[in-house]
Structures are given as structure tokens and as C-alpha cells.
Amino acid sequence: MDCTTKSESGQISILVLAAASAFLLGTIAIGMVTEVLITQQRLNAKAEAIALAGALELEFDQEQACVTAQEFGFTNFGIRAECVSDSASIEILLSEPNPNRIFSVFMPNIQASSRAGIASDD
Amino acid sequence: MTSELSVGLDEGKHLVQRSHGYAIAEFALAIPALLIVVAMSVSLVGLTVTQIQLESAAALGARIVGRGDPIPDSFRNSLPEGTEIVIEPDVEAEVVNFTLETTKNIDLILVPYQIDLTASARARLEPVFEEFG
């Protein structure tokens, strides 16, 4: 029997299996990145909403601006916000645990910050 | 005896050599499976892009409505086709919930499938001062 003859049987199957696995792994990776991106996007929107809520109070009572913003954040989003305000602006910092198990090893928390000020009269 | 064996071996070798075209036939059978996987991947990426788009639009829409402005046509036109806008103002709490709902068709090769995507955002209702005179 000729032992040196090479059969092509199965070569393409292995190639296709490898390509399909690569595509599936790539899709899973994209899904995980998207999960983190969407969480970041939602947190940005929350930070923005909380900062705007605080900025509305800034014009009337500067000392209460942070309290109002934090109350708004806790009541509507169930989140505690770090707040810094001065006479013209308010800054909000939010932090949430990373929902993705794999990425949470490298990035345990997702953070978002937003700054808002008193609207001008123009 | 030697000649009989050689005849048998020659015949077998001839059969093995014929398997050179097997790869093409195997590739022809396997390529639809690969295409299905690629189509699924592309559809899922499309879904994620739409979801990100909806999240961004919901935050923007909540801010527009919270300010007391009407939703501009440019905003509606920027949404994916068939997107439904749900606005739920809560006057007592002085907040507005802005929700976007859409249905995304995933046209796999033989199996049409629909997935509902939703994004919502919340904003504080800003006081609207009416101009006098």
C-alpha cells in the first residue's frame, strides 16, 4: 500500500470549522464590547440628566444644587452621584460596576461625568 | 505472484489518486454553512449598531422633551425606520420618560426573525416661562 499518498479528505472541513469558530468568537467579542459601550452610554445619559437637574437649581440656590442633583439621581436612577458645584456650574461623577465579567477584570467600574451650567439669557 | 500483487496495488493507488477532487466537493458542501455563520454575525453586528443608535437618540430625545421643545423632524428622520416614540411625562415628579421602540428584521437565509429593540431615557422637566406682552 502506498503510505506516502496524501488525502485531501477533511482539510476543507477543518478550514471551514476554523473560519466559523473565528467568526463566532469575533461576534461574541463584539457583543461584549457593545454591552460595555451601551452601559457607558446609559451612564453618560444619566450623568447628563442629573447634572441638568442640578443646574436648574443652581440659579436659585447654589448650596442646594448638589443636594437636588443627588436626590434626582437616587430617586430616578437609583444611583448615588458624586457632585461638585460652584457659582456657575455643577459637575457630576457616576460610577457603576462593569456588567461584563471578562472586561471587569481589566476595568472593574464604568464611570461617566457631566458638567452643566446656568443657561445664559441670550 | 509478483505481477498479481502489483496489479492490485496499482489499482488501489489509482483509486487514492482520484481523491484529489474531494476538496472541491467538500468545499462546495461546507460553504453554505460558513455563509450562514457569516450572515448571523453580520446581523448581530447590525443589531448592536441599532441598539447603540437608539440609546443615543433616547438620551437626546429626553433632553429635548424635558426642555419643553417639540421633537424636530430631523430627529424623527434620524431614527431607524419604523421606530415608535413613547413619551410619558410625570408632572408630579417633574420628569419625563422617553422611550424608543423598534423592530429589527434579521433575514437569515431561510429563517426570517424579528427582534424588538428598546431604549429609554429620563430627564427632568424644565420650567417653561411664558413670555408676556
Image: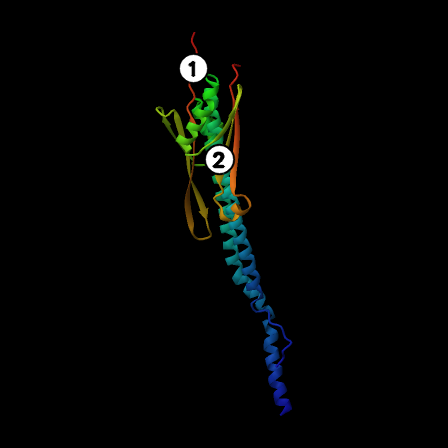
The residue closer to the viewer here, A2 or A54, is A54
Q: Nearer the viewer, residue A5 or B49?
A: B49
Q: Residue at x 51, y 46 (%)?
A: A32
Q: Is residue A86 above or below residue B82?
A: above
Q: Is residue A9 left or right of residue B126?
A: right
Q: Is residue B112 visible?
A: yes
**CA distance separating discs 1 and 2:** 30 Å
Q: Position of residue A14 (x, y in %)?
A: 56, 63
The residue carrying mark 1 is B129
Parent chain of label 2: A
Q: Chain of mark 1?
A: B
Query: Relative to B70, does residue A28 appear above or below in the rendering?
Result: below
The residue sitting at 63% across, 78% down in the picture is A3
Q: Which residue lies at the image location 41% right of the left edge and 23% below the top edge?
A: B125
Q: Quadrant of residue B114?
A: top left
Tell me the SS state at disc 2.
Answer: helix
Neighbourhood count class around disc 1 (C-alpha, 10 Å): few under 14, some 14–19, many 20 upward: few
Evaluate whether residue B77 shows in this view.
no
Q: Which quadrant holds the N terminus of chain A?
A: bottom right
Q: Position of residue A107 (x, y in %)?
A: 54, 43
- Amino acid type, mark 1: Phe
Which residue of the protein is positioned furthest toward the left in this rendering? B92
Coordinates of residue B28 in the picture (x, y in percent)? 54, 62
Amino acid of disc 2:
Leu
Which of B25 and A12 lies nearest the eye of the viewer?
Answer: A12
Q: Find disc 2 in the rendering and name its residue.
A: A43
Residue B112 screen position, x and y as percent: 42, 49
Mark 2: few/some/many CA within 10 Å (<14, 14-19, 20+)? many
